[in-house]
Amino acid sequence: MKRIGVLTGGGDAPGLNAVLRAVVRTAERVYGAEVIGILDGFKGLLDGRFRHVGGQDVRELIRMGGTVLGTTNRDNPFACPGENPGDTPIDRSAECLENARKAGFDALIIIGGDGTLRIASDLGRQGLNVIGVPKTIDNDLASTDYTFGFWTAIDTATEALDRLRDTAESHHRVMILEVMGRHAGWIALHAGIAGAADVILIPEIPYDPHSVAKTVVRCQERGRASSLLVVAEGAMPRGGEMAVVAVDAITGVKRLGGAGERLARELEALTRCDVRVTVLGHLQRGGSPVAFDRILATRFGEAAVHVAMAGRFNRMIRLADGCIEDVDLEEAVRKVKLVDPSGPGGALLKSARALGIAFGDE
Ligand code: F6P
């Protein structure tokens, strides 16, 4: 009997459990293969914490948010923390390979975003039989049209904007919604259009606070009771930097936050508006996946098993023009996808501008 390991890594995203369900069902029903879940991402692979996942275990999973396998976005087997803070990181990747060998994995399906999939690719180069499945609410992986989790995050952000519009209208206020997305403005751009925002600020288009203030004042002059602004956490004023809350001591990754508050202060200095800020934060990562994410996750999980069973390794599953395909993993994780006026997202930016949405750059 063939044995497939499954690992979820990085920040969670709605649809991870749906992938696991599809992997287990396809493996058992089509190939009579066994699935072993690795607990808590690469940490579990290093510690050898595994458990069998069968058909009964995944019955309810398609609609569940989070990941029943657990995850971590701090554990890179190639750079594990030493005994004391400040020690040189240790490469423990060989232990991952040894644990996978001992567990008898014929293939390892690794579900993650750019960071997790880069580690997967490096482990693949060392000899692990890996297949990558792309996930992230940020939708910033260049080689797939969409990652699952993204549309659920947009729905959450859109609902938040609808609610904010109600209270903003009542109080004649300027409401700022800060959304996630790291270096990419995809969530802000999509939610801003769906939620009929007046202004969308994204990292790819540094903004001029005066321009944003002008838009807000213009809204009021036209008799509008409120303004709705969506700000990506990575948005920055021209000549400024991203707003950073902290830098992770282990990974060195910057934790973003404060872009909304910064904009509020800028607007208060430039206008007489009453401004409030809502930070949507991790609400965007939890919850039941929307139908699109469930279907995409299911198709990814199924495809990953077929690729594993065909013995094709170091591949990543992706969505390209509606079709599910597999591509070279190392190549696939080389580039991130940002909103680009003359590339991906360009048409959407144009539509938003045509509808009168401002980006703080005019
Ligand atoms: O990559 C997904 C994401 O949710 C980003 O949008 C956000 O910047 C980051 O993860 C937050 O990470 P953490 O859960 O470590 O705070």
Image (cartoon, grey):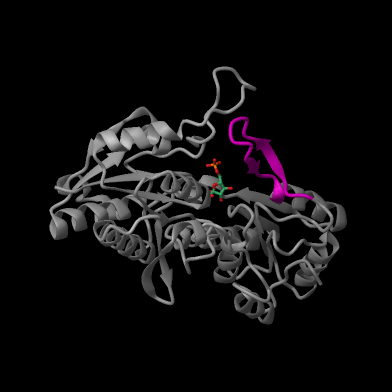
Seen in the picture, residue 7 relative to 213 is either above or below; the reply is: above
- State the residue at coordinates (66%, 44%): 257
Which quadrant, please, contains the C terminus? bottom right
Would residue 269 be visible to someone looking at this image? Answer: yes
Seen in the picture, residue 85 relative to 76 is either above or below; the reply is: above
Compared across the picture, whether 351 is left or right of 64 comes to: right
Would residue 43 be visible to someone looking at this image? Answer: no
User: In this orientation, which residue lies closer to the viewer: 334 or 294?
Assistant: 334
Segment colored magenta:
241-259
- State the residue at coordinates (75%, 71%): 219
Farthest top residue? 84
Farthest bottom residue? 354
Q: Position of residue 253 (x, y in %)?
A: 62, 40
- State the residue at coordinates (54%, 70%): 194
Residue 352 falls within the magenta-colored stretch:
no
User: In this orientation, which residue lies closer to the viewer: 249 or 108?
Assistant: 108
Q: Position of residue 328 (x, y in %)?
A: 44, 62
Q: Position of residue 307 (x, y in %)?
A: 30, 61
